[in-house]
Amino acid sequence: EVQLVQSGTEVKKPGESQKISCKASGYNFSRHWIAWVRQMPGKGLEWMGFIYPGDSDTRYSPSFQGQVTISADKSINTAYLQWNSLKASDTAIYYCARRHSGAYYDYMDVWGKGTTVIVSS
Amino acid sequence: DIQLTQSPSSLSASVGDRVTITCRASQNIRTYLNWYQQIPGEAPKVLIHSEFHLQSGVPSRFSGTGSGTDFTLTISGLQPEDFATYYCQQSSATPWTFGQGTRVEIK
């Protein structure tokens, strides 16, 4: 079974750093892009970017470029989302999702359950 | 960036109703339009990909149509488990973008 298991809820203070994870199983991790999607409290979905674990090629939404770092370690089938200095406005649920793409299709077919990050002083 | 505009933003419907949600793209996105369902407290789940392809395991009461810039998700015979928020999403170009969501509530 294809699964993405995300790390647990984090409560942090503004200015702190944070790295959350997304561990894949049930498929060849290196061959599928992993996307990150933000959902702020009571709001919609926002695509942050994705990474190809095979060669770490990474694409960011301009809205998130420079604000976060997406990385992956293919030796342990895990993708990461990292902040150097959190802000209160980073409070949200963060989902990872597998990109499933081919000749005529391109979508996110498997999702993690989400990691809640709360940033509060 | 490609903008997606969903309508309505919310609707009230009864079990058994036929429900239609539309999604308009700011430019031609060919068939790269996907629909997701999000039940409160859960992760999104793909229903329809590539405009009209039903994702494996999704009930056939869900269907999608489109024409490059205008797309429709239809639920034929709303069920209690369908009360959720629905999002369209384009994968024609990065940055990928989502519509603002349509909340389907019980009448």
Image (cartoon, coloured by chain):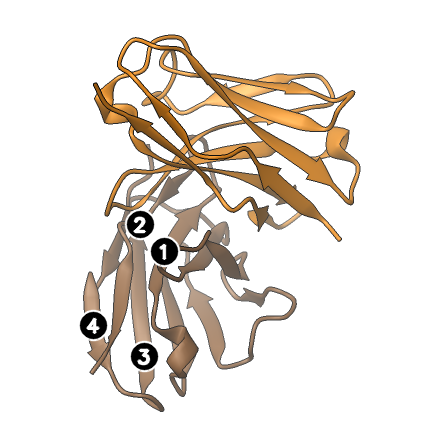
| Mark 2 or mark 3, earlier in chain | 3
Between A8 and A103, the one nearer to me in the picture: A8
Q: Residue at x 35, y 20 (%)?
A: A62
> Where, quadrant-wise, is the C terminus of chain B in this rendering?
bottom left
| Mark 3 or mark 4, earlier in chain | 4
Q: What number of labels is visible?
A: 4
Q: Tag on residue B11? A: 4
Does the image show residue A102?
A: no
> Where, quadrant-wise, is the N terminus of chain B in this rendering?
top left
Amino acid under disc 1: Tyr
Q: Residue at x 52, y 58 (%)?
A: B46
- Provide residue B31's location: percent of width, then percent of height: 50, 54
Distance Cα–Cα, label 2 vs label 1: 6 Å
- Chain appearing in orange on the rendered image: A
Does dot 4 land on a helix, a strand or a loop? strand
Q: Tag on residue A72? A: none
- Chain appearing in brown on the rendered image: B
Q: Is residue A57 above or below residue B57?
A: above
Check disc 1 and report the residue beneath it: B87
| Mark 4 or mark 2, earlier in chain | 4
| Mark 2 or mark 1, earlier in chain | 1
